[in-house]
Image (cartoon, rainbow, N blue to C red):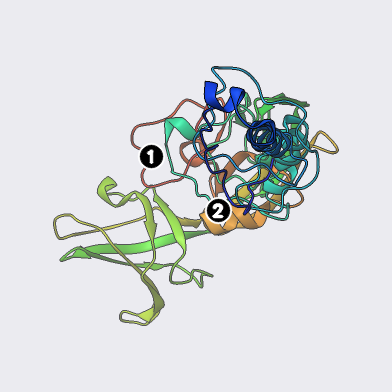
């Protein structure tokens, strides 16, 4: 139904017929009747649209009744009305949805708010192949055997991996054996103003930035996990020296060992339903965790070993109980 630019109707003039008109000249009387009929016929024809679109001088009150049989043609004017059939075929949700999808012709401009309860999704399968940096929801534990011949047995128990959309993937137990990292004997060690300096009894392969574990020192306050700040030659006579920061009273001691870490990531590849090992890395970092995952795989366990064997403190899978104080190590925690 289109608006028209036609001239609006003018009110019909009121023509009164008197008794004198009836009794008088028949020609005059006939002329009056013809004028009345002509005006009425023109108005009726105009309302029927015989001369084009129908102009209406005021609002049209349908008293709740429907306007039916509208044109199905595409509207051309901003004020054109359209039929339900045309609206459904052009503007309905099923018709517009493909255009508003992310890969559609007119995607919605929007954003995600972290931890917004109104934007939580029940199904997030598109996240199933995104690399995880832990925690990961799985039901495995990690156990170590006794080290022998420079290797330590590692067992990742069978379990279920819960993906982002809530689906689970079963996987079998994985038995492995990994080499123990280099371990070096400590000759002397001392702490002055929060800086620990030690030397090994022989040449070592330590490097500044290495995460190391110190164990078995006579003064047990030196034992723990640290990051080396310096490795070089020093002392008298000159020998292999290492340093790290540690708060504590000034003191000196001897004995014990210093060992590098060996970090291994055990990942699950959904397409083969089998764990595989990546590593070793010298330290457990987010960057290393991401680098360890390829082609939609996810980390099931992080295994840490030292020169003395398995390191349960910094090793975990999904079912490993969290520890409150882990000496700065990184763990996978059960997110289920």
Against 208, is 81 above or below?
Answer: above
Q: Where does the image place residue 198, in percent across and percent down from the top left? A: 33, 66
Quarter of the image with the N terminus is top right
Residue in view at x 67 percent, y 37 percent: 31
Q: In the image, residue 155 lies at what x, y percent?
A: 68, 32
Q: In terms of sequence position, does the residue under pointer 1 or pointer 2 come before the other? A: 2
Q: Which residue lies furthest to the front in this view?
A: 24
Q: Is residue 224 visible?
A: yes
Q: Residue, x 66% and y 40% (percent of image)? A: 81
Q: Position of residue 297 (x, y in %)?
A: 72, 44
Determine contact: label 1, label 2, CB under 8 Å: no
Q: Is mark 1 on a helix, strand or loop?
A: loop
Would you call the spot at circle 1 few (<14 residues within 10 Å), some (14-19), or many (20 or more)? few
Give the quadrant of residue 276: top right
Q: In this view, does 12 lie to the left or right of 67?
A: left
Disc 2: which residue: 109
């Amino acid at each position: 139904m289109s608006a028209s630019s036609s001239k609006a109707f003018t009110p019909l003039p009121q023509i009164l017929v008197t008794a004198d008109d009836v009794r008088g000249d028949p020609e005059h009387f006939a002329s009056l009747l013809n004028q009345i009929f002509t005006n009425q016929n023109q108005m009726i024809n105009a309302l029927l649209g015989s001369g084009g679109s129908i102009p209406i001088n005021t609002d049209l009150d349908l008293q709740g009744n429907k306007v039916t049989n509208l044109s199905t043609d595409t509207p051309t004017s901003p004020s054109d009305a359209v039929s339900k059939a045309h609206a459904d075929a052009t503007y309905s949700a099923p018709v517009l949805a493909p255009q508003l999808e992310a890969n559609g012709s007119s995607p919605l401009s929007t954003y995600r708010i972290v931890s917004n309860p109104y934007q939580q999704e029940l199904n997030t399968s598109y996240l199933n192949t995104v690399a995880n940096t832990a925690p990961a929801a799985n039901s495995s534990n990690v156990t170590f055997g006794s080290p022998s011949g420079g290797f330590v047995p590692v067992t990742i128990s069978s379990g279920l991996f819960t993906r982002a959309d809530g689906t689970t993937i079963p996987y079998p137990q994985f038995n492995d054996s990994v080499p123990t990292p280099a371990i070096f004997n400590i000759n002397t060690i001392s702490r002055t103003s929060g800086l620990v300096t030690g030397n090994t009894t022989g040449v070592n392969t330590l490097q500044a930035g290495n995460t190391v574990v110190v164990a078995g020192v006579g003064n047990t306050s030196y034992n723990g996990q640290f990051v080396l700040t310096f490795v070089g030659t020093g002392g008298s006579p000159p020998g292999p020296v290492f340093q790290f920061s540690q708060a504590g009273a000034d003191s000196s001691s001897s004995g014990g060992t210093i060992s590098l870490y060996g970090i291994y990531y055990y990942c699950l590849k959904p397409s083969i339903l089998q764990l595989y090992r990546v590593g070793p890395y010298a330290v457990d970092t987010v960057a290393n965790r991401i680098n360890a995952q390829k082609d939609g795989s996810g980390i099931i366990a992080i295994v840490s070993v030292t020169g003395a064997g398995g390191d349960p403190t910094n090793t975990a899978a999904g079912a490993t109980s969290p520890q409150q104080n882990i000496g700065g190590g990184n763990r996978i925690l059960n997110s289920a």
